[in-house]
C-alpha cells in the first residue's frame, strides 16, 4: 500500500512571515535574513516562485526557514510582475485529497 500524500501538499500554510519586501533591480523582492548573523551569512539563496507567485505564504515561510536554519540570505523576486495565479485557485487547481496517481501506488 502506498503511503498517503502529505496533507500539506497543496494547501495554504499558517504562520507569520518575518522577512521584508524590498525592491532589488526594479523587482519587488521578498528578503529573508538569518537571525543574529552579525552581517555574515553562509551564502544567498534565490527562490524562483511557482505559478502562485512570490507573495504566497508557503514560499515566504520556506524562505524564512532557509534563512534561519542555514544562516542564508534568501531572495524571492516577483518574477510574475504581479500577475500570478490567484491564491483561491489552489482548491480548484489541486483537488488531491484521496487522489493517488498510478505511479504513486507502486511506491
Image: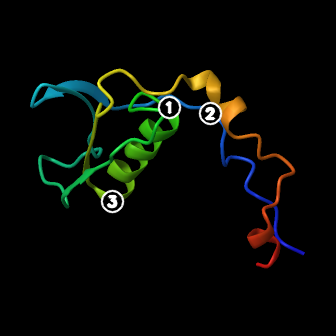
Q: Badge 2 is on which residue?
A: 12
Circles 2 and 1: CB distance less than 8 Å?
yes
For the N terminus, the image quarter is: bottom right
Query: What numbered label is drawn on residue 57?
Result: 1
* 24 w.r.t. 9: above or below: above
Rounded to the nearest angstrom, the CA distance separating label 3 from label 1 is 20 Å
SS category of the residue bearing label 2 = loop
Toward the viewer: 33 or 80? 80
Q: Is tag 2's residue or tag 1's residue first in the polypeptide sequence?
A: 2
Choose top left, top right, bottom left or bottom right for residue 91. Answer: top right
Sooner in the amino-acid sequence: mark 3 or mark 1? 1
How packed mark 3 is, by other alpha carbons closer than 10 Å (few <14, some 14-19, many 20 or more), is few
- Across and down, in percent, residue 18 comes to 38, 31
Q: CA distance from mark 2 to mark 3?
A: 24 Å
Residue 76 vs 1, above or below: the answer is above
Question: What residue appears at the point 50 percent right and 27 percent down from the top-left corner?
Answer: 85
Q: Is residue 40 left or right of residue 93?
A: left
Please rate how many residues cluster around mark 1, counting C-alpha atoms within 10 Å: few if below 14, some from 14 to 19, many from 20.
Answer: some
Q: Which mark is residue 70?
A: 3
Image quarter hosting the C terminus: bottom right
| Residue found at the very far bottom of the displayed protein | 106
Residue at left 38%, top 44%? 63
Determine whether, in the image, residue 59 is placed left or right of residue 94. Answer: left
Image side of residue 90 versus residue 81, left or right: right
The residue closer to the viewer here, 27 or 30, is 27
| In the rendered image, the vertical position of residue 80 relative to residue 99, given as above or below | above
Amino acid at each position: 500500500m502506498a503511503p498517503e500524500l502529505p496533507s500539506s501538499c497543496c494547501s495554504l500554510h499558517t504562520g507569520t512571515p518575518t522577512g521584508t519586501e524590498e525592491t532589488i533591480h526594479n523587482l519587488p523582492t521578498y528578503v529573508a535574513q538569518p537571525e543574529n548573523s552579525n552581517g555574515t551569512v553562509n551564502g544567498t539563496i534565490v527562490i524562483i516562485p511557482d505559478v502562485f507567485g512570490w507573495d504566497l505564504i508557503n514560499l515566504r515561510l520556506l524562505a524564512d526557514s532557509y534563512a534561519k536554519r542555514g544562516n542564508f540570505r534568501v531572495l524571492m523576486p516577483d518574477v510574475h510582475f504581479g500577475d500570478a495565479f490567484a491564491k483561491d485557485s489552489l482548491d480548484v487547481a489541486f483537488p488531491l485529497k484521496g487522489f493517488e496517481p498510478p505511479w504513486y501506488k507502486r511506491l
